Amino acid sequence: MIWRILGIGSMVLVTLLGIGLIQEAKHMPDEFTANAMRVAGGIVIGAFWALYLFRLYM
């Protein structure tokens, strides 16, 4: 039970990290870096949630 709560809490933190990367992209001076940060945020959110859901249902 405690591991499931810790897992969900860590996923919330990772999601906030990814959202933070996407939001910080607004302040980047060039468009290439901004797009790279948006992609990195999306990869962080998507990959960690996919891994969490895979572990949850396997």
Image: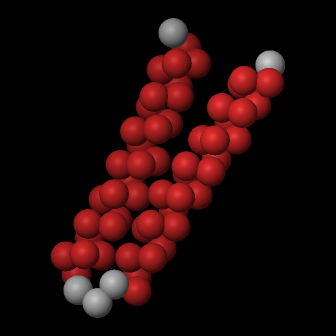
Q: Compared to 16, does 48 lie above or below?
A: above
The number of numbered badges drawn on the structure is 0
Q: Compared to 1, does 58 lie above or below?
A: above
Q: Position of residue 7 (x, y in %)?
A: 66, 32
Q: Compared to 10, does 18 lie above or below?
A: below
Q: Left or right: where does residue 20 sit relative to residue 42?
A: right
Between 50 and 7, the residue placed more toward the observer is 7
Q: Position of residue 30 (x, y in %)?
A: 23, 86
Q: Residue furthest bottom?
A: 29
Q: Position of residue 49 (x, y in %)?
A: 50, 36
Residue at 68% over, 35% down = 8
Residue at 33% over, 67% down = 37
Q: Compared to 9, does 51 lie above or below?
A: above
Residue at 44% over, 66% down = 21
Colour convention of the picture: secondary structure
Q: Left or right: where does residue 58 sit relative to residue 32?
A: right
Quadrant of residue 16 in the image? bottom right
Q: Residue furthest left?
A: 32
Quadrant of residue 28 in the image? bottom left
Q: Residue furthest top?
A: 58
Q: Residue furthest right?
A: 1
Q: Left or right: where does residue 52 sit relative to residue 38?
A: right
Quadrant of residue 50 in the image? top left
Residue at 40% over, 58% down = 41
Tell me the quadrant of the picture where the N terminus can be found.
top right
Q: Position of residue 58 (x, y in %)?
A: 51, 9
